[in-house]
Structure formats: structure tokens, C-alpha cells
Amino acid sequence: QDELVESGGGLVQAGGSLRLSCAASGRPISSYVMGWFRQAPGKEREFVAAIGRSGISTYSADSVKGRFTISRDNAKNMVHLQMNSLKPEDTAVYYCARSTGVLISLSPNEYNYWGQGTQVTVSS
């Protein structure tokens, strides 16, 4: 059974850093585009970053560009999100997701496997 499990969330002060990890089990992630999304209370789930199958291609939302970096280790079946210079508006539940397609997509509708999420809280 395919499963994604996120870890690494927590409480951090503004300006701090966190590294989220997503451990995949079941089918190898090497065949899939992988992404990170987040959802704050009362808001829709929004795209954060995605990475192509080989790890060469990445794309990040404008709101996190220059602060967040997505990476993957296909040998270990893991995806990471390094988050630096965190802001209170980054507070949300962060989800790892596996895409149905071979191209990077910003739409959550293009992802069909999701983790349970990990809470990130940034205090001011």
C-alpha cells in the first residue's frame, strides 16, 4: 500500500528554519513528480513547491521563493522541504503529495496521494 508520512514540523520563531521530510512507502517515488502544499485555518490548500522526477526541475510559489527549497532522494524514497526565514504567515499544516502526471503541476487536483500533514507554527 502506498503511503506518505510527513515529519519535521513544529513551533519556531519568525526568522527561524525547519526541514520537513516526507517518507514514502510502497511504489518508488522516482516515477512521480512530488509536491508540498499547505493549508492554513479557514483557507484553501495552496501549492508550495514541486520537484520533477529526477530532481533537476523544481518550482516554488512566489510567496516562498528564495526561502524554501524542495529536494528529493529517490534512493531513500524521500522528499524534503527546507524552510528558511520563516514568517508567521507560513503557519499552516504542510502536506506532501504524489502527482498523477509527469509534469510539475500547481493544482492539488493533479495529486492523488497525500500524507496526513505536519503542523508548522511560526510565532512573531
Image (spheres, helix red, strand yellow):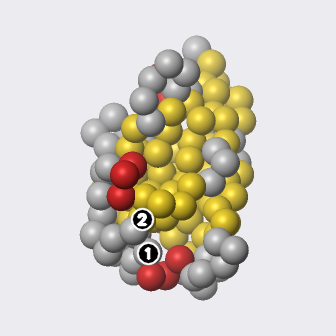
Asked if marks 2 and 1 touch (Cβ < 8 Å), the reply is yes
**What residue does disc 1 label?**
32
Q: Is residue 38 above or below residue 103?
A: above
**Image location of residue 75, percent across then percent down:** 60, 85
**Image location of residue 83, percent across then percent down:** 52, 44
Residue at position x 28%, y 39% in the image: 62
Residue at position x 49%, y 82% in the image: 30
Instruction: Tell me: 48 left or right of 123.
Output: left
Q: Does residue 123 appear anywhere in the picture?
A: yes
Compare marks 2 and 1 and give the one earlier in the sequence. 1
Instruction: Tell me: 31 left or right of 41.
Output: left
Residue at position x 39%, y 80% in the image: 54
Residue at position x 58%, y 14% in the image: 124
**Image location of residue 94, percent across then percent down:** 57, 42
Task: State which quadrant residue 104 falls in.
Answer: bottom left
Instruction: Tell me: 102 left or right of 8.
Output: left
